[in-house]
Amino acid sequence: MAQQPSHLHDGQQLPCLSIVIPVYNESRRIGRTLETVDRYLHDHHLRAEVIVVDDGSTDDTAEIVRRAIEPGNGFRLVETPHGGKAQAVFRGLMKSDASIVGFMDADLATPLSTLDAVLQRVGAGADMVIGSREGTGALRIGEPGYRHAMGRVFNWIVRRLLLADIDDTQCGFKFMTQAARDQVLPLVRLYRNAGPITQPRVTAFDVELLYIARQLDLRIDVVPVTWSYGTSSTVSPVRDTLQNLRDVFQVWINGRRGYYR
Protein backbone atom coordinates (compact mmCIF):
# COMPACT_ATOMS: atom_id res chain seq x y z
CA MET A 1 0.00 0.00 0.00
CA ALA A 2 1.49 3.32 -1.03
CA GLN A 3 2.24 5.74 1.76
CA GLN A 4 1.21 9.37 1.49
CA PRO A 5 3.03 12.51 2.59
CA SER A 6 0.45 13.38 5.23
CA HIS A 7 -1.28 11.27 7.87
CA LEU A 8 -4.58 13.06 7.37
CA HIS A 9 -6.79 12.96 4.33
CA ASP A 10 -6.18 16.02 2.14
CA GLY A 11 -9.19 17.48 0.36
CA GLN A 12 -11.36 14.54 -0.62
CA GLN A 13 -8.74 11.88 0.17
CA LEU A 14 -9.74 9.34 2.76
CA PRO A 15 -7.28 7.94 5.31
CA CYS A 16 -5.79 4.56 4.49
CA LEU A 17 -5.73 3.68 8.20
CA SER A 18 -8.06 4.33 11.13
CA ILE A 19 -6.84 3.70 14.67
CA VAL A 20 -9.54 3.47 17.32
CA ILE A 21 -8.40 4.08 20.91
CA PRO A 22 -11.08 3.35 23.54
CA VAL A 23 -10.56 5.32 26.75
CA TYR A 24 -12.13 5.47 30.18
CA ASN A 25 -10.69 7.86 32.79
CA GLU A 26 -7.34 8.02 30.99
CA SER A 27 -6.48 11.65 31.78
CA ARG A 28 -3.15 10.65 33.27
CA ARG A 29 -1.72 9.32 30.02
CA ILE A 30 -3.95 10.04 27.03
CA GLY A 31 -2.15 13.30 26.23
CA ARG A 32 1.24 11.59 26.02
CA THR A 33 -0.27 8.71 24.06
CA LEU A 34 -1.69 11.02 21.41
CA GLU A 35 1.61 12.88 21.14
CA THR A 36 3.40 9.57 20.59
CA VAL A 37 0.89 8.39 18.00
CA ASP A 38 0.96 11.72 16.16
CA ARG A 39 4.75 11.67 15.99
CA TYR A 40 4.83 8.08 14.75
CA LEU A 41 2.29 8.66 11.99
CA HIS A 42 4.05 11.82 10.89
CA ASP A 43 7.49 10.20 10.86
CA HIS A 44 6.21 7.24 8.87
CA HIS A 45 4.18 9.36 6.42
CA LEU A 46 0.99 7.41 7.05
CA ARG A 47 -2.32 8.83 5.87
CA ALA A 48 -4.28 7.96 8.98
CA GLU A 49 -6.90 9.11 11.42
CA VAL A 50 -7.07 8.47 15.16
CA ILE A 51 -10.56 8.02 16.61
CA VAL A 52 -10.55 8.34 20.39
CA VAL A 53 -13.77 6.93 21.87
CA ASP A 54 -14.38 8.29 25.35
CA ASP A 55 -16.43 5.66 27.18
CA GLY A 56 -18.21 8.01 29.57
CA SER A 57 -15.14 9.12 31.51
CA THR A 58 -15.77 11.00 34.74
CA ASP A 59 -12.44 12.83 34.66
CA ASP A 60 -11.13 15.31 32.06
CA THR A 61 -10.08 12.72 29.48
CA ALA A 62 -12.42 14.11 26.82
CA GLU A 63 -11.19 17.67 27.35
CA ILE A 64 -7.57 16.58 26.97
CA VAL A 65 -8.44 14.87 23.69
CA ARG A 66 -10.27 17.98 22.46
CA ARG A 67 -7.18 20.08 23.16
CA ALA A 68 -5.08 17.61 21.12
CA ILE A 69 -7.29 17.95 18.03
CA GLU A 70 -5.67 20.28 15.52
CA PRO A 71 -6.22 20.94 11.81
CA GLY A 72 -4.35 18.28 9.87
CA ASN A 73 -3.50 15.85 12.67
CA GLY A 74 -6.40 13.47 12.01
CA PHE A 75 -7.61 13.22 15.62
CA ARG A 76 -11.31 12.74 16.29
CA LEU A 77 -13.25 12.41 19.52
CA VAL A 78 -16.36 10.26 19.91
CA GLU A 79 -18.16 10.46 23.25
CA THR A 80 -20.47 7.70 24.46
CA PRO A 81 -22.16 6.75 27.74
CA HIS A 82 -20.12 4.33 29.83
CA GLY A 83 -20.89 0.94 28.29
CA GLY A 84 -17.53 -0.83 28.37
CA LYS A 85 -14.61 -1.31 26.00
CA ALA A 86 -16.51 -3.52 23.56
CA GLN A 87 -19.13 -0.90 22.80
CA ALA A 88 -16.49 1.83 22.59
CA VAL A 89 -14.47 -0.20 20.09
CA PHE A 90 -17.48 -1.07 17.94
CA ARG A 91 -18.64 2.54 17.76
CA GLY A 92 -15.18 3.73 16.83
CA LEU A 93 -14.76 1.10 14.13
CA MET A 94 -18.08 2.06 12.55
CA LYS A 95 -17.08 5.74 12.41
CA SER A 96 -14.19 4.99 10.06
CA ASP A 97 -14.07 5.38 6.29
CA ALA A 98 -10.49 4.08 5.99
CA SER A 99 -9.51 1.01 4.00
CA ILE A 100 -7.90 -0.51 7.13
CA VAL A 101 -9.54 -0.11 10.54
CA GLY A 102 -8.58 -1.38 13.96
CA PHE A 103 -8.04 -0.66 17.60
CA MET A 104 -5.31 -0.53 20.20
CA ASP A 105 -5.06 0.26 23.90
CA ALA A 106 -4.37 3.72 25.28
CA ASP A 107 -1.34 2.52 27.24
CA LEU A 108 0.50 1.60 24.00
CA ALA A 109 1.35 -1.77 25.54
CA THR A 110 1.87 -3.06 22.00
CA PRO A 111 4.51 -1.03 20.12
CA LEU A 112 3.29 1.27 17.36
CA SER A 113 5.89 -0.29 15.10
CA THR A 114 3.51 -3.26 14.83
CA LEU A 115 1.53 -1.10 12.40
CA ASP A 116 4.24 -1.77 9.82
CA ALA A 117 3.43 -5.49 9.94
CA VAL A 118 -0.30 -4.72 9.75
CA LEU A 119 0.10 -2.81 6.51
CA GLN A 120 2.42 -5.45 5.05
CA ARG A 121 0.11 -8.35 5.92
CA VAL A 122 -2.99 -6.60 4.59
CA GLY A 123 -1.07 -5.77 1.43
CA ALA A 124 -0.28 -9.49 1.14
CA GLY A 125 -3.95 -10.45 1.36
CA ALA A 126 -4.84 -10.71 5.06
CA ASP A 127 -8.39 -9.72 6.00
CA MET A 128 -7.51 -9.30 9.69
CA VAL A 129 -4.18 -8.87 11.47
CA ILE A 130 -3.86 -9.40 15.22
CA GLY A 131 -1.04 -8.96 17.69
CA SER A 132 -0.02 -11.98 19.75
CA ARG A 133 1.91 -12.10 23.02
CA GLU A 134 2.56 -15.82 22.53
CA GLY A 135 4.65 -17.83 20.10
CA THR A 136 8.00 -17.42 18.42
CA GLY A 137 9.17 -13.82 18.43
CA ALA A 138 6.69 -12.63 21.07
CA LEU A 139 7.79 -11.18 24.40
CA ARG A 140 5.92 -10.18 27.54
CA ILE A 141 7.52 -7.55 29.78
CA GLY A 142 6.63 -7.08 33.44
CA GLU A 143 3.61 -9.38 33.58
CA PRO A 144 3.08 -11.14 36.94
CA GLY A 145 3.38 -14.90 36.72
CA TYR A 146 -0.12 -15.54 38.04
CA ARG A 147 -1.64 -13.30 35.34
CA HIS A 148 0.21 -15.15 32.61
CA ALA A 149 -0.90 -18.50 34.03
CA MET A 150 -4.54 -17.39 34.15
CA GLY A 151 -4.31 -16.18 30.58
CA ARG A 152 -2.88 -19.49 29.40
CA VAL A 153 -5.72 -21.43 31.05
CA PHE A 154 -8.27 -19.10 29.47
CA ASN A 155 -6.69 -19.46 26.04
CA TRP A 156 -6.62 -23.25 26.38
CA ILE A 157 -10.40 -23.16 26.83
CA VAL A 158 -10.81 -20.81 23.86
CA ARG A 159 -8.71 -23.08 21.65
CA ARG A 160 -10.61 -26.19 22.73
CA LEU A 161 -14.02 -24.63 22.05
CA LEU A 162 -13.64 -22.02 19.33
CA LEU A 163 -10.27 -21.05 17.88
CA ALA A 164 -7.89 -23.99 17.80
CA ASP A 165 -5.00 -22.23 16.07
CA ILE A 166 -4.91 -18.83 17.84
CA ASP A 167 -2.66 -18.69 20.90
CA ASP A 168 -3.66 -15.22 22.07
CA THR A 169 -7.11 -13.75 21.46
CA GLN A 170 -6.90 -10.95 24.03
CA CYS A 171 -4.01 -8.78 22.88
CA GLY A 172 -5.49 -5.29 22.45
CA PHE A 173 -4.14 -4.73 18.96
CA LYS A 174 -6.35 -5.83 16.07
CA PHE A 175 -6.85 -4.45 12.56
CA MET A 176 -8.94 -5.50 9.60
CA THR A 177 -9.87 -4.34 6.14
CA GLN A 178 -12.95 -2.20 5.73
CA ALA A 179 -14.57 -5.08 3.83
CA ALA A 180 -13.89 -7.48 6.72
CA ARG A 181 -15.32 -5.00 9.20
CA ASP A 182 -18.48 -4.70 7.13
CA GLN A 183 -18.89 -8.48 7.19
CA VAL A 184 -17.94 -9.13 10.82
CA LEU A 185 -19.53 -6.34 12.86
CA PRO A 186 -23.15 -6.87 11.75
CA LEU A 187 -22.93 -10.41 13.18
CA VAL A 188 -21.63 -9.34 16.60
CA ARG A 189 -24.04 -10.24 19.40
CA LEU A 190 -22.12 -9.73 22.66
CA TYR A 191 -22.36 -6.20 24.11
CA ARG A 192 -23.83 -4.66 20.97
CA ASN A 193 -26.75 -3.16 22.91
CA ALA A 194 -25.52 -3.51 26.48
CA GLY A 195 -26.82 -0.88 28.88
CA PRO A 196 -24.80 1.61 30.93
CA ILE A 197 -22.36 0.23 33.49
CA THR A 198 -20.84 1.73 36.62
CA GLN A 199 -17.37 0.16 36.68
CA PRO A 200 -14.65 -0.95 34.23
CA ARG A 201 -15.55 -4.22 32.52
CA VAL A 202 -13.10 -6.51 30.77
CA THR A 203 -14.76 -8.87 28.31
CA ALA A 204 -13.95 -11.44 25.65
CA PHE A 205 -15.48 -9.51 22.77
CA ASP A 206 -12.22 -10.14 20.87
CA VAL A 207 -13.01 -13.86 20.85
CA GLU A 208 -16.34 -13.22 19.18
CA LEU A 209 -14.74 -11.01 16.50
CA LEU A 210 -12.17 -13.67 15.67
CA TYR A 211 -14.69 -16.51 15.73
CA ILE A 212 -16.98 -14.65 13.34
CA ALA A 213 -14.05 -14.00 11.01
CA ARG A 214 -13.24 -17.73 11.06
CA GLN A 215 -16.85 -18.65 10.32
CA LEU A 216 -16.74 -16.30 7.32
CA ASP A 217 -13.48 -17.90 6.09
CA LEU A 218 -11.59 -14.64 6.38
CA ARG A 219 -7.81 -14.76 6.51
CA ILE A 220 -6.42 -13.90 9.96
CA ASP A 221 -2.68 -13.22 10.18
CA VAL A 222 -0.97 -13.27 13.58
CA VAL A 223 1.96 -10.96 14.34
CA PRO A 224 4.14 -11.63 17.41
CA VAL A 225 4.61 -8.51 19.55
CA THR A 226 6.68 -7.26 22.45
CA TRP A 227 4.01 -6.40 24.99
CA SER A 228 4.46 -4.41 28.20
CA TYR A 229 2.23 -5.11 31.20
CA GLY A 230 0.43 -2.02 32.49
CA THR A 231 0.79 -1.48 36.22
CA SER A 232 -2.33 0.70 36.25
CA SER A 233 -4.54 -2.00 34.76
CA THR A 234 -8.16 -1.97 35.92
CA VAL A 235 -8.51 -5.72 35.42
CA SER A 236 -10.02 -7.66 38.32
CA PRO A 237 -8.47 -11.13 37.85
CA VAL A 238 -11.30 -13.19 39.34
CA ARG A 239 -14.33 -11.14 38.30
CA ASP A 240 -13.12 -10.46 34.78
CA THR A 241 -11.92 -14.02 34.17
CA LEU A 242 -15.38 -15.31 35.07
CA GLN A 243 -16.95 -12.74 32.74
CA ASN A 244 -14.61 -13.77 29.94
CA LEU A 245 -15.48 -17.42 30.41
CA ARG A 246 -19.19 -16.62 30.27
CA ASP A 247 -18.56 -14.74 27.03
CA VAL A 248 -16.66 -17.66 25.51
CA PHE A 249 -19.41 -20.13 26.33
CA GLN A 250 -22.02 -17.72 24.93
CA VAL A 251 -20.07 -17.45 21.68
CA TRP A 252 -19.89 -21.26 21.56
CA ILE A 253 -23.67 -21.47 22.05
CA ASN A 254 -24.29 -18.78 19.43
CA GLY A 255 -22.05 -20.64 17.01
CA ARG A 256 -23.90 -23.89 17.55
CA ARG A 257 -27.13 -22.04 16.81
CA GLY A 258 -25.75 -20.71 13.54
CA TYR A 259 -25.89 -17.05 14.47
CA TYR A 260 -22.50 -16.19 12.93
CA ARG A 261 -23.15 -17.07 9.32
Image (cartoon, rainbow, N blue to C red):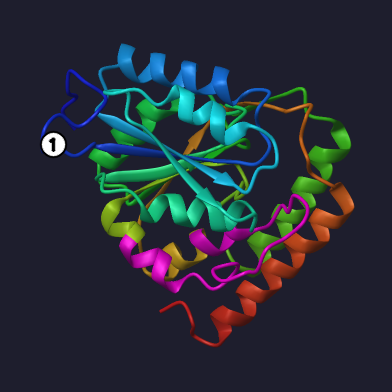
Q: Is residue 187 above or below residue 9?
A: below
Q: Nearer the viewer, residue 78 or 45?
A: 78
221 relative to 29 in the view: left or right: left
Secondary structure under tag 1 reads loop
At 63% from the left edge and 37% from the top edge, which residue is drawn? Answer: 134
At 56% from the left edge and 17% from the top edge, which residue is drawn? Answer: 32
Q: Nearer the viewer, residue 219 or 201?
A: 201
- The part of the chain drawn in magenta is 182-209
The image quadrant of residue 193 is bottom right
Structural crowding at the residue carrying mark 1, measured as other residues with C-alpha within 10 Å and reported as few (<14), some (14–19) or many (≥20): few
Tell how many labels.
1
Q: Nearer the viewer, residue 94 or 142?
A: 94
Q: Nearer the viewer, residue 15 or 219?
A: 15
At 21% from the left edge and 20% from the top edge, which residue is drawn? Answer: 6
Quadrant location of the C terminus in the rendered image: bottom left
Q: Which residue is mark 1?
A: 13
